Amino acid sequence: MYTEKQVWDPLTRVCHILLILTVVGGWLIGEFRTFSIMQWHFYCGYATGGLVLFRIIRGFSGPTEIRFSSLLHSPHNILRYAATLTNKQPSGTPGHNPLGSLFILLIVAALAGQVVTGLFSKDDALFFSGPLASFVSESTVLSVTSLHNLNSTVILVLVGVHVTAILFYWVWKKENLIKPMITGKKK
Amino acid sequence: MFNNPRRFGLILSLLAASVIAVPSYAADDDAIGKAIKGRQAGFQLYSFYAGQLFAMAKGEMDYNSELAATLASNLSSVANLNNGMMWLPKSDNVARAGDTRAKPEIWASDSDIGAKAAAMKDASAALASVAGEGLDALRSKIGDVGKSCKGCHDNFRAKDF
Ligand code: HEM
């Protein structure tokens, strides 16, 4: 018989939903920025920064299944899991499977990089600058702003892969990963 | 003067050096480099005038109607300069990597950079007509100016040198 067991604790679930809002919001406002909405890009960015920092802290001290120590898998393990990916059955892992773990590490790093580069970025058409841009040279600001633009595409791709994977598990493996992230329970 | 062979040799070599130096002096007189510097200076002027107007609109600088009117009128004036001579062929960021961020697309036959420049002229003229009439009036028109700057940069300016 199936039993429901708690996989994601409430704090993880709340932070995840907030992160979706701040990253999607920040991304859209950044991409389609205008003078009147750009300030909200910064607010979304700071909120994302706070959530990422909190995630990093919890990566060391939070529940076992979200700790970085549980997310670090050897390349061998990741490949072995990847080889079973097309099996029409749920992964059976209570927390993140090895590929999912890799994704978490990548998205946390990419988001942290996005927030840090944002702090030094400058838009000289709408006259908005990250709060630290004035502390570094003009040429540094230009290269960091390019990185911020480039990394925003990396984040878009990562989010795309994440959503596609969830749909793939749902349709192909008949495993609903969305419900546990909302209710915390997994069969 | 020429009875001292050493001095004769020195003068000869000085003459030779000056002849060799002439072509390299001509190469320093780089018309494309000057045109690039000229147009960048023009954008720095845009940035100087617009920067203070944006600062006022954001409340980072006190609104002063006289200053706002002058800044906006100057911005509109410089936007109307005909600086076509600064956009020499081969002054793009491929031919002059490191000196300029102007993309080759500017010179493409189907380039709509003229329309982008016209949009900025219109936006800055509209701003100039109201900038002295209060902060709300300034705010109502400044967004279009930023949009016009961004519209051109997105298509025709590289992110980095
Ligand atoms: C959630 C985190 C963030 C995301 C997803 C994000 C995303 C983006 C995106 C998609 C763009 C448009 C890129 C383009 O035009 O190609 C952008 C631009 C920008 N962002 Fe962020 N950003 C984040 C955080 C921040 C932070 C924390 C700051 C500063 C406090 C910041 C400052 C800027 C600035 C100044 C620009 C304009 C750069 C330019 O002119 O090209 N961003 N961001």
Image (tube, coloured by chain):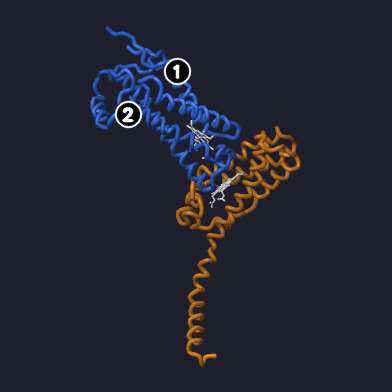
Chain colours: A blue, B orange
- Disc 2 marks which residue? A72
Q: Nearer the N terminus, badge 2 or badge 1?
A: 1
User: Of all residues shown, which one is farthest toward the front?
Assistant: A61
Secondary structure category for the residue under label 1: helix
Residue B121 in percent (x, y) is at: 63, 45
> Residue at point 50% right, 46% down?
A140
Residue A116 in percent (x, y) is at: 48, 36
Q: Chain of mark 2?
A: A
User: Of all residues shown, which one is farthest toward the bottom?
Assistant: B3
Residue B86 in percent (x, y) is at: 57, 56
The answer to whether residue B140 of the structure is visible from this angle is no
- Horizontal side, residue B59 vs residue A172: left or right: right
- Horizontal side, residue B62 vs residue A12: left or right: right
Quadrant where the N terminus of chain A lies?
Answer: top left
Three-letter code for the amino acid on which mark 1 is drawn: Leu
- Disc 1 marks which residue? A11
Q: Mark 1 Cα within 10 Å, few/some/many (few <14, many 20+)?
A: few
Three-letter code for the amino acid on which mark 2 is drawn: Leu
